[in-house]
Image: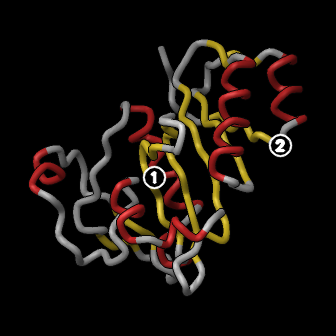
Amino acid sequence: MDGKTADPQWHEENGLPPRSRHETQSPLQDYYRVHVWRDTREDGEEEPLGGHVLSGTPFEVYIYDTVRKKYPAYEGWEICEQCSLEDGSRVDFYVVARNVQGQVVRGVVIEAKDKAELETVDIEQMIHYLTQTNAGEAIIYVANDTLISPTVQERADEEDVQIIRTQWGRN
């Protein structure tokens, strides 16, 4: 990824979380606060993140805890929710790790698909996000009752897009 992602203005424009958990939230974020999220420290204990705000669907809110546990803040991971990409598309979660200069050194694109059936177009969307972000990983979380055809699973496997079933039930 290019060095522009180290620019604080880009960081802010793309909705990346504050670098310090002690930074204040905007009045708009305070208004839309839906949950005070917790983070797991290295010692396994949980601590508040200072009122993290999620703006997605209920399934995206459900998935956030899973994403945060897999990519913890204490290991340097930042999560950008509903991250706008250069072409105007939005990925549900763009998770990044940065070097000491602030440049992205590892990226993961994650989508939460709460739908009856996963389609090939969903896999193509992830490939597009990978191209736009230069991320190294792509993950689609689905509800436990989402249908995944062999054709869709094969396409995901070809492109190294992980499909992970959750305990979320659509019915």
Mark 1 vs mark 2, foreground winner is 2
Residue at the (50%, 72%) spot, across then down: 6
Three-letter amino acid code at disc 1?
Asp
Q: Which mark is residue 65?
A: 1
Q: Is residue 106 left or right of residue 101?
A: right
Q: What mark, if any, has residue 100 been given in the picture?
A: none
Q: Is residue 94 above or below residue 160?
A: below
Between 160 and 171, the one nearer to me in the picture: 160
Question: Label 2, on which residue?
Answer: 160
Residue 13, image x, y percentages: 35, 55
How far apart marks 1 and 2 lie (CA) works out to 23 Å
Query: Where 37 sits versus 151, above or below?
Result: below
Q: Residue at the spot x=64%, y=54% of the render?
A: 108
* Relative to 26, 18 lies left or right: right
The amino acid marked with disc number 2 is Asp
Q: Residue furthest bottom?
A: 100
Quick one: label 2, few (<14), some, or many (20+) residues within 10 Å? some
Question: Relative to 140, does residue 44 appear above or below in the rendering?
Answer: below
Q: Residues within 10 Å of mark 1 (few under 14, many from 20)?
A: some
The image quarter containing residue 95 is bottom right
Q: Secondary structure at mark 1?
A: helix
Taking the image as shown, residue 63 lies to the left or right of residue 140, namely: left
Percent of width and height locating residue 53: 27, 51
> Disc 2 on helix, strand or loop?
loop
Q: Quarter of the image containing the N terminus?
A: bottom right
- The mark nearer the N terminus, 1 or 2, is 1
Q: Nearer the viewer, residue 169 or 112?
A: 112
Q: Nearer the viewer, residue 68 or 91?
A: 91
Q: Nearer the viewer, residue 6 or 99?
A: 6
Q: Residue at x 83, y 43 (%)?
A: 160
Left or right of 5? Residue 105 is right
